[in-house]
Amino acid sequence: MQKNNSPLTLLGNISPKQFFTEYWHKKPLLIRQAIPEFQPLLSKSELFELAAQDDVESRLITFFKKHWEMKNGPISSIPVKEKKDWTLLVQGVNLHNDDANELLKQFRFVPDARLDDLMISYAVDGGGVGPHFDSYDVFLLQAHGQRRWQIGAQKNLSLIEGMPLKILSHFESDQEFILEPGDMLYLPPQYAHDGVAIGECMTYSIGFRAPSFQELGESFMNFMSESIDLPGRYSDPDLKTTTKPAEISTELLTTLSEQIAKIRFTNDDITIFLGEYLTEPKPNVYFDSPEKPLTPKRFEQAALKKGVRLSRKTMMLYKGKHIFINGESFAVTTADKDILATLANQKNLAGSDLLGASPDAMEAFCLWYEDGWLELNP
Ligand code: SIN
Ligand code: CO
């Protein structure tokens, strides 16, 4: 976690503050040797194994005979290496691999609510996903081999229709770079780019999330539907005869408008919705519970000795007294809030940090441990 604003090698020796002011959402940044002597965190075969799992999101993209095709995972059959122009994309590698999870933590100068995942692409010579733009910021870290990136600030973002993936109908690059292992390219949202492998290569994409207002609004309405409380039922004791039986009466409409106007939501509702929404595990995430969990008493003893850490798949956020973890929310006391906020920020608590935890907090830790959301430190 970034504690201060000092220059980072990762950002080419500029501070996160300078990065946000000059580049974030504004212009690309090429960082040579952002991670000096970077080595791939997973071998090619480990990546292929992940792509074959059904709890992992993966895609195989081919451009055989100049024809784009995309197959969604699980991908169990990989084209032969000798064949050119294909790439395998594996999403959310941080959820399945400790080193990938640690790498993502280097990007926590951006808040967790915005950080999405680590995607790894493997490509053979000529492989890529075609010229496109993304709706999110991205850091493209070269992990193995070389990739030629062509990028352009074009305004025309129209796409070729009927394609299985987003391909720009006109792509004009104004800059070109060849990235070597350890080099990294930051691209703001909507920036046109095309990365083509020069020989076999692996690229790590550190992606961000920016839900659309429409998606947030629809999810909020869904969330609120669970708490709406409108007692009573429409009645019309003074109903009169009508010559237009098909017409909806003004009285019926007015009554409904009055009732709908009673539906209210507070800032607390919005806070709880947002925290639950942002920490909700993705649909293919399954937590690994301990095979032989300790009893609550033994768990407490072990936790006080070793400390605890959030599991790789756990997302924990907080705002004020509200704590959010994996789609659930709790309102906590001030004393517990400090401990839980430390756990969320550090993703780890030392045994000594747990001394002040209330019985309620300790019980929650034990339940999270049983569910595989939290682990004892090794
Ligand atoms: C890739 O790694 O091949 C694609 C990454 C991207 O263009 O966003
Ligand atoms: Co892209």
Image: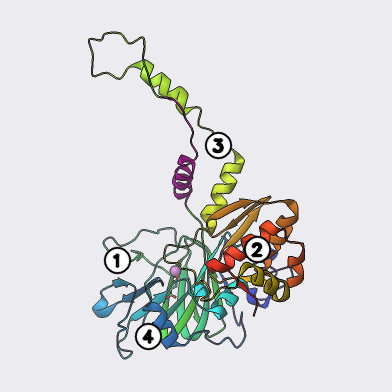
Mark 4 or mark 3, earlier in chain: 4
**Structural crowding at the residue carrying mark 3, measured as other residues with C-alpha within 10 Å and reported as few (<14), some (14–19) or many (≥20):** few
Residue under numbered circle 3:
265
Q: Nearer the viewer, mark 4 or mark 3?
A: 3
Mark 4 or mark 1, earlier in chain: 4
Whole-angstrom CA distance, mark 4 to mark 1, is 20 Å
Q: Is mark 2 within 8 Å of ligand 1?
A: no
Residue 195 at least partly seen:
yes
Residue, x 51% and y 71% (percent of image)?
289
Q: Is mark 3 within 8 Å of ligand 2?
A: no
Residue, x 60% and y 73% (percent of image)?
294
Which quarter holds ligand 1?
bottom left
Q: Is residue 216 above or below residue 96?
A: above
Residue under numbered circle 1:
164
Which label belongs to residue 124?
4
Mark 2 or mark 4, earlier in chain: 4
Residue under numbered circle 2:
344
Q: Quadrant of residue 249?
A: top left
Q: Is residue 336 above or below residue 96?
A: above
**Structural crowding at the residue carrying mark 2, measured as other residues with C-alpha within 10 Å and reported as few (<14), some (14–19) or many (≥20):** many
Q: Magenta part of the protein: which range?
A: 212-232
Image coords of residue 231 (percent x, y): 46, 28
Image coords of residue 59 (percent x, y): 36, 73
Residue, x 31% and y 91% (percent of image)?
82
Q: Nearer the viewer, residue 273 or 364?
A: 364
Left or right, 33 with respect to 202, comes to right
**Helix, strand or loop at disc 3?**
loop
**Helix, strand or loop at disc 1?**
loop
Q: Nearer the viewer, mark 2 or mark 4?
A: 2
- Asked if marks 3 and 1 touch (Cβ < 8 Å), the reply is no
Kind of residue sitting beneath label 2: Ala
- Asked if marks 4 and 1 touch (Cβ < 8 Å), the reply is no
